Amino acid sequence: MLQVNISFPSGSGNSLLLPEHSKVGDLKLLAQKSLGRGFLKLVTANGHVLNNLADSLQSAGVQDGERLTVVAQQPNMIATARAFAMWSCGSNTVIIWGDPDSGGDCSAVQDQLRNVKQIQATNWAFAAILANGSVVTWGDPHRGGDCSAVQDQLRDVQQIQATNWAFAAILSDGSVVAWGRSDRGGDCSAVQDQLRNVKQIQATSSAFAAILSDGSVVAWGNPDWGGDCSAVQDQLRDVQQIQATSGAFAAIVSDGSVAAWGCVDCSAFRDQLRNFKQIQATSSAFAAILSDGSVVAWGNPDWGGDCSAVQDQLRNVKQIQATSTAFAAILSDGSVVAWGRGGCSAVQDQLRNVKQIQATSGAFAAILSDGSVVAWGLPDWGGDCSAVQDQLRDVQQIQATSRAFAAILSDGSVVSWGNLAFGGDCSTVPDQLQYL
């Protein structure tokens, strides 16, 4: 038997006994069970991370009496419209479930997913940045899942953004490489010469907008959804930040003014939007949190564009989330105010001390301060979590596809609910999750 001593940087830990033929994965599982924590990274005294779970302890250099430092990792989760991907930064393991045609099957590239730093998603595909700056994609090949046409250009990638149909990557030299559906942002050739010294990219559902180092903006993709900023180009000087809804961009200029373009007219609210902090969107309406914590909404009144019925309650708003037809705002006291087609009256009494809200296209899910979850909205879109309610304890984070939710618990397990075809069933992956 081998004795391995594990401890957190704080000093707390345990002594473990394993058979000599054990693998790194066996050690990780025993460590997580012993400490009651998931997503742990094991580091040797010389700083080597035990990443390859298939290695024997002997080949990994772990000897009897070894002392290892245990580091708690932050799990990451992202979703396409119908599939989930979960990983920890630097991990060699990515856990996937959901619709195989929408990114729910990465078996063809599993061996390439080593030292994953970041993953982004269109509605149909995933793209992972590895530690060496290269990119691995999977999912629908016509909607971002195949980057072979630009693979040679994808070197030293720093960041990736996504529309619903395409990806755009910023390289270390400030240039941009795009792929996916060409008319939805996957082709930036018309503006390629302008894409120099790019600092940041934002995306609507069908277009990209890039801020350059001189504060100017370059946009491409579907012109009706933000891909053409020519109408406000003169206003786009010294841009500090860009926010995006599903169909429009809003650029914050250094003087505090806002320039907006895409499928939205915010001219009636231009003066109020001078000091906004966040914009969210349903399918046909917009809501902005202003610097004083109040809210301005506009667009289709039935889908959230009219918040007059709850205007007096919208004070000290901290966060807004949106389904396709409704908004939900978290106030500073942890209560929630909702409007549009998706009110929360049936669960209003339960919505106390809310920390975070996530949304599918038709439902909301709120994490409370005690780690429990309250869901409401269309049942088959995630609005009914009663079947898994007893499992939703110590929830750390929630992610959503268009019709399902997945919650990460503190012990490293995952609970999902909603439409099974959209990722609402993660029963096939619990064994894999132990090794993340």
Image (spheres, rainbow, N blue to C red):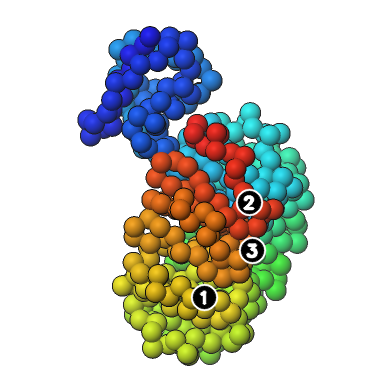
Image spot of residue 301 (x, y percent): 59, 87
**Residue 432 vertical position relative to residue 122 in the rendered view, above or below:** above
Residue 123 is at least partly visible in this image? yes
Q: CA distance from mark 2 to mark 1?
A: 23 Å
Of mark 2 and mark 1, the one earlier in the sequence is 1
- Please, what secondary structure does the residue beneath circle 3 have? helix
Across and down, in percent, residue 400 comes to: 56, 57
The answer for how far apart the CA atoms under marks 3 and 1 are is: 19 Å
State the residue position of label 2: 423
Q: Are marks 3 and 1 in contact (CB under 8 Å)?
A: no
Q: Quadrant of residue 266?
A: bottom right
Q: Amino acid at mark 3?
A: Asp
Residue at 38% x, 55% y: name it: 371
Q: Is residue 333 above or below residue 99?
A: below
Which mark, residue 327?
1
Relative depth, front residue between 177 and 87: 87
Dot 3 crowding, Cα within 10 Å, few <14, some 14–19, many 20+: some
273 to 92, vertically: above or below = below
Q: Position of residue 249 (x, y in %)?
A: 57, 71
Amino acid, disc 1: Phe
Q: Quadrant of the N terminus?
A: top left
- Image position of 342 (left or right of 41): right
Mark in front: 2 vs 1: 2
Give the foreground label among 3 and 1: 3
Return the disc, 3 or 2, that comes first in the chain's sequence. Answer: 3
Quarter of image, res 318: bottom left
Residue 276's image quarter?
bottom left
Residue ID for mark 3: 380
Q: Mark 2: few, some, or many residues within 10 Å (few <14, many ≥20)?
A: many
Count of numbered labels shown in the rendering: 3
Label ID, residue 173: none
